Amino acid sequence: MASRKPQRRREFGSVRQLSSGRWQARYWAPDGSRHTAPETFETKTDAQDWLTLAKADIQRNVWVDPDVGAVNFEEYALKWVAERGLSATTDELYRRLLRLHILPAFGDLDLDEITPPAVRTWRAERLAATGATTVAKSYRLIKAIMETATDDELIRRNPCRIKGAGSEKAKERSTATVDQVDALADAMGPRWRLMVYFAAYGPMRPEEQAALRRPDVTLEPLAVRIREAAPELTTGRRVEGDTKSAAGTRTTFLPAFLHVEVKRHLDWFAEKEPNGLLFIGEKGAPFRRSTFGRKWRRARAKVEPPDDFRFYDLRHTGHTLSTQSGATLKDTMVRAGQSSEKAAMIYQHSDDERQQEVAGGIDDKVRAARQKTAAGPRRAGQA
C-alpha cells in the first residue's frame, strides 16, 4: 500500500502573478472578509513579505481593517462636534476653527489618509499665515478628533504627534492703574461705568455681567451672586446658560467703595422689574456686544491705557490687586471663577469670610491710591 503524501501546511494568504508581470497579495481577515494588498509588488518575495507583516499584525491583535478608515474627515469631524454636547460658545469656536483652518487642508481626505507628515506641513503653513495661539487651538482640535477616531478603531494611531504643538504661549497681558480704571469708568458714562468696576474689582467676565439680575446683587454685604452667563455669539444671538465652568458659579464680595456705584446703578439704570437685568442699553434691551465695543474703544482712546488693552484685561488688573492685597492663589481663583486640577489646590481653602477680607484689602488699596492722587495737586499748589 502506497504511503500517503504529507498534507501541505495551509499558508496564510496567497500570491499570484498578474498579466502585467507584477505580483498581488491577498489574505483572509479574522472577520472572514478577504483583503487585497493596496499595491502590487515587483517580485513574489516582496508580496510574501507583505503577507508576513499582515499575519504578524493579526497574531499581535493590532490588525486594523484597512477599509475602516475610509471615512471622510469632514463628515466625521462635524459629527464629532455635534456629539460633544458643547456650550454654544465652544461649539461656535470649534466650527470656526474647522471652517477656516482645518477643513481646507483635510476636508476632502479620509481619516486614514491623514499622515504625520501632512499634519506637520499643515501646521507649518498655518503658523506662517496666522497667529500661534489660533494654530495651537486648531491643532488641539484636530488632535482630539483623531484621538477619538483611534478609540473608534478607525485608524491605528493618531497622526498628530508634534510635541508641544497644542500649547499656547500668550504674552503677558497689561494691567491698568487705579487712576486708569477710574478714568475708563468716567469715559464710559454713567450707564456703563459699573461694568468697568465689576470687571476690574469683581473680577467678572463680560458674559457673566450680561446675565446679572437684580436678585443677584446685595448691598449688605456688598456682593454679587454669579449663577449664569449670557455670551453673545458672532451671529448676534445671546445664549443664556451655565457659567464657563463649575467654578464660575460663585459669590463675589465687592470692595466697599463700590457701594454708592452699585446703589446708584440699581436706582437709575437696571430694569425695574423685580427680576430685571442689571445692565441694559439706552432703549431698554439687553446690551449688544457691538454697541458696547464701540463705547469701549472710544473710552480707551480718551484714557490711553497700556497698548492693546482690552476690556477683558480689567480682570487681570483685578487678579493683580487681589494678590497685592494678600490673597492666596486659591483666593484669586475663587474670586475670578477659575478652576484648576493641580493637586496643590486641594489643600487650599477660601471661604466667604476670606473673600470678604480680600474685598476689604482691595478697598484699602484703591482708597489709598485715590487719596494720593487727590493730594498731589494740593501739594503742588502749596509749593
Image (cartoon, helix red, strand yellow):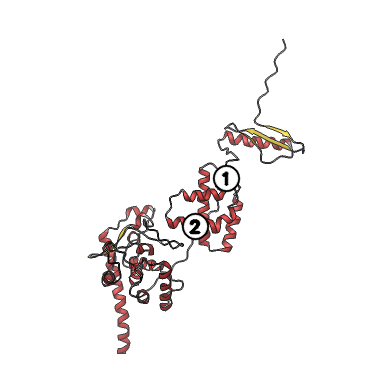
Q: Residue at x 66, y 24 (%)?
A: 9
Question: Residue 62: x and y, percent?
Answer: 56, 38
Asked if residue 159 can be seen in this view, the reply is no
Question: Residue 187: x and y, percent?
Answer: 37, 77
Q: What's the amino acid at mark 2?
A: Ser
Which secondary structure, mark 2?
loop
Quadrant assignment, res 50: top right
Q: Residue at x 57, y 47 (%)?
A: 72
The residue beneath circle 2 is 167
202 and 370: which one is in front?
202
In-image side of 138 versus 299 (left or right): right
Q: Are marks 2 and 1 in contact (CB under 8 Å)?
A: no
Quadrant containing the C terminus in the rendered view: bottom left
In-image side of 33 versus 86 (left or right): right
Measured along the vertical axis of the image, is residue 74 above or below residue 375? above
Which secondary structure, mark 1?
loop
Q: Which mark is residue 327?
A: none
The residue beneath circle 1 is 71
Question: Residue 353: x and y, percent?
Answer: 25, 60
Q: Residue at x 58, y 34 (%)?
A: 58
Asked if residue 187 can be seen in this view, the reply is yes
Q: Between disc 2 and disc 1, whose residue precedes?
A: 1
Image mark count = 2
Crowding near pointer 2: few (<14 within 10 Å), some, many (20+)? some
Q: Residue at x 40, y 58 (%)?
A: 239
Question: Residue 40: x and y, percent?
Answer: 71, 40
Furthest-top residue in view?
1
Q: What's the amino acid at mark 1?
A: Val
